[in-house]
Amino acid sequence: MPVNPPYDFPMKRRYEELGTNPVSTEPVISAEYFEAERHAVFERSWLMVGRESELPNPGDFFVKRIAPWKSTVVVARGRDGRINAFHDVCPHRGMHVCGREQRGNRKFFTCGSHGWVFGLDGRVVGVSEESWFHTLDKDRLRMPPVAVDSWEGFIFIHRDPAPAESLPEFLGEINIGYGGYFDDIFFKPVGRYEADVKMNYKFYLDSSVEAYHAGYTHLQNNTGQNAKSGTALRLESSATRLYRRHRTIGVPIGVGIRDLAPIEGLAFKHGGAITPYDSRVKDRPLPSGINSNRDENWAFDILEIYPNAILFLSAPLYAVIGLWPSAVDRCRFEVEVYMNEPSNAAERVALEYGLVSLRDVIREDLNIAEGSTDALASGALKEMQLSDQEIAVRHSYSVLNQVMKDRLTR
């Protein structure tokens, strides 16, 4: 068995300001904390809700539930080509206009309660029995707007129609460095998973930015190779980048040697552009923000965009995870996976293998998140202990605690 060299705490040396103290469990167990978090975090942040490619034509729209806002939002492309976003509520007497989550193409939105009609920008364009109203300023009436902007093809919304901070300002250090990667011609949506989970959403954030758990939680999955090698999968401090709000880690291919499962071997051998070994993938240049060290042993990056989005970024695929908490112990989990479209049966098999493999990793992490939420619910444990390799987890709570502290001092 290989002998590991002494660990010299590289993360602490690089990010000394984050300290080494235990982290309080209050943010993941307190209902009062979550209620304050809804206002301080989610109602004051830009939230990723989809891609511009989901709305290619004028009249295209989707309806999305934003649980921490206690709201449903309509996102629609207008006749002028602009994307609009507004709360799904009729200014007459407050009924939903669209209701359930859905997508499609329309010229107008009509309230099923009293027949009021709204344009693709949310403004009222028709009122049934208008003469019955004493005074009605239709120029002022509309479904309440929210701010909307885009980054690298992703649509973001903000609850404040005129937020003090623009989307580029909010993204800060990650606003540049990703140009050209999210290519809608190379990458196509190939799979989606959704689940309503009994977890605090931060537990899933935590597992996404540390590799310490990989050889244990994922022992039976393809990332479990490291536990068999006797060497833990560790992150390099130079590939861990902690920003004002956001964070990203670079994950190595792994260590040790294991035999591939038969279907796994076939998928890698015949998968074409679905795998990292195909020339169409290897020769595609990555922007500076991805694998920033240009490490030859690089497998993928994880980019967490505060407060609730996770991007899994690799050469042959990317996945977008959205976490939509409705309570301290309830969360809607969504993941959309993008790959190159298969051109033959072998590539289709490789694609499906990649999807179910990623699904299994996700389910294992969700299982841990649910278990942790349940185990901590008693309040018996007051603190969590974090290793040097969990520095990005520490950073996540540090950012959150500072936001909450700033809110209390206002």
Image (tube, rainbow, N blue to C red):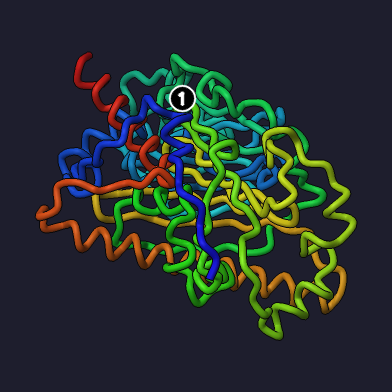
**Residue 5 position within the rendered picture, expressed as x and y whole percent measured from the top left:** 51, 52
Q: Mark 1: which amino acid?
A: Arg
Q: Quadrant of the C terminus?
A: top left
Residue 124 vertical placement versus 349 (above, below): above
**Residue 132 position within the rendered picture, expressed as x and y whole percent measured from the top left:** 34, 29
Q: Residue at x 75, y 56 (%)?
A: 316
**Residue 269 position within the rendered picture, expressed as x and y whole percent measured from the top left:** 82, 75
140 or 205: nearer the eye?
205
214 or 150: nearer the eye?
214
112 or 10: nearer the eye?
10
Q: Residue at x 61, y 62 (%)?
A: 255
**Residue 38 position within the rendered picture, expressed as x and y whole percent measured from the top left:** 29, 36
Residue 102: tell me if it is visible.
Answer: yes
The quarter of the picture where residue 263 lies is bottom right
Asked if residue 349 lies left or right of residue 39, the reply is right
Residue 230 vertical placement versus 96 (above, below): below
Tally the numbered discs. Answer: 1
307 or 281: nearer the eye?
281
Residue 112: tell me if it is visible.
Answer: no
Q: Which residue is mark 1?
A: 244
Asked if residue 21 lies left or right of residue 133, the reply is left
- Mark 1 residue crowding within 10 angstroms, few (<14) / some (14–19) / many (20+): few
Q: Residue at x 42, y 68 (%)?
A: 217
Q: Secondary structure at mark 1?
A: loop
Q: Residue furthest bottom?
A: 262
The quarter of the picture where residue 357 lies is bottom right
